[in-house]
Amino acid sequence: MIDFERLRILTESAKYDVSCSSSGSSRRNTKRGLGNAEMGGICHSFTEDGRCISLLKILLTNKCSYDCQYCVNRRSNDVERAEATPEEICELVMSFYRRNMIEGLFLSSAVDQSPDATMEKLLDTVIRLRKLHRFNGYIHLKGIPSADKKLIMRAGEFVDRMSFNIELPSERSLKLLAPQKSKVGILSPMGYMATEKKQALSLKYNKFLPAGQTTQMIVGASPESDGQIIRLTQGLYKKFALKRVYFSSYVPTNEKNALLPTSPVGILREHRLYQVDWLLRFYGFKAEEILDENENLPEGYDPKCHWALKHPEFFPVEINTAPAEVLLRVPGIGFKGAYKIVNARRYGKLDFLDLAKMRIVLKRAINFITCNGKFFGTENQLAVKNTLLLTSTDSVILSQLSMFSNDEIRQSVLQGEI
């Protein structure tokens, strides 16, 4: 069984990876197995900064052969090192699951020796979990770029979701800060996994990556603009049918490299990118519509409000006649709100009181809509801008929760009391 010190090192080393959402799987359970990865079988728990903590997030090892300058586990960094065997990870997962501490596993690893050697160990771990321990729960595996295609495709048959993290938005930045990695080595696995997933869906075969694949980009470690990041995100969704693109604000781990920031980036920029990601996936926006002239998102306004302020010719929108895709572009009307309006107006005309009952954010929406031809907003553009302006643009620095944040929790874990 893995000892506490190794467990602490390997879980702490994994905390910078945020691609751990545990939704969307439809893997069938096996008889006499333990756990459940169906959509209703995963409990979600989130930290204050939005990160999911329902999965055991751990590295197989943090002993890395690579020297990526932004990474805390880089070869040249003087940190505590540890590794676990595939069987130790399996025992840990089963023990934690039986004690109701986790609902699934997020497994990653530093590149030890070579990509193929590391991927073989990761594959061995998930096969043991599924076949030997009969674990039916959710597994998210972070693949190793440039590993052999056969190893990666084999892993896709046993896990619910895989991710190959792009990390830096341009190949130039990769060469400067992560010379052992390449754009081809990261995108190639994403390509053939997308092809295999598409084929599996056409054959109604849900065993290959039932929850799809994701990726992650580090925001602020390199000088790329928001425009470059957003266009890349849009391209990834279109080409590889990704479930999610995650963004992680850079946290300084290397003060010796002059190319890297010396202070935390903060979460406001990350938050704005997530807002754009939502607009791209659910609201019908294109990257070209959202971006400002300087290729960066404004801090003071959320992206949809900023778009609305730049396009006064689109407004006001009549609530009782506008189609759902038009309502979705109105500040203060979200995805659910738009479809509530469309469904409710079939039974009669709506007024502002009806919108308030639907919990539409009228403080934002009132300057962009009419109800039965009536407009109760203001035509003073400065007043509208002030209404939509973020009250504080200060970047807040939040830290991720640790599984073992103090001695009391540590003792509880060891004694099986949580």
Image (spheres, grey):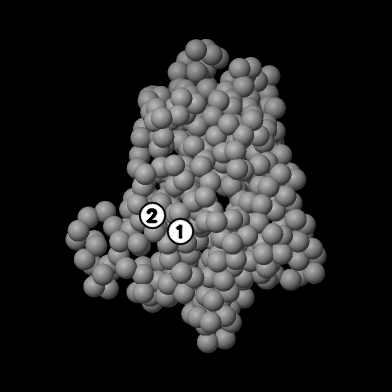
Residue 332 placement (x, y as % from top left): 52, 34
Question: Is 170 situated left or right of 23 in this image?
Answer: right
Q: Which residue in the rendered view is the most extreme toward the bottom?
A: 32
Q: Earlier in the sequence, mark 1 or mark 2?
A: 1
Q: Residue at x 47, y 66 (%)?
A: 104
The residue type indicated by label 1 comes to: Thr
Residue highlighted by disc 1: 61
Q: CA distance from mark 1 to mark 2?
A: 8 Å
x and y percentages locating residue 336 in the rendered image? 57, 47
Q: Nearer the viewer, residue 24 or 71?
A: 71
Closer to the camera in the image, 374 or 160: 160
Q: Which residue position is annotated with label 2? A: 81
Q: Is residue 325 visible?
A: no
Residue 320 is situated, as x and y percent measured from the top left of the image, at: 65, 37
- Relative to 42, is 338 above or below? above
Tag 1 and tag 2, C-beta contact below 8 Å: yes
Binning the other alpha carbons within 10 Å of mark 2 as few (below 14), some (14 to 19) or many (20 upward) gives some
For mark 1, give the secondary structure: loop
Please tell me which residue is depicted at 60% across the width and 38% down the height of the picture: 179
Q: Quadrant of the C terminus?
A: bottom left
Measuring from the top left, give residue 373's x and y in whole percent.
Answer: 63, 27
Q: Which quadrant is the N terminus positioned in? A: bottom left
Residue type beneath disc 2: Arg
Q: Is residue 239 visible?
A: yes
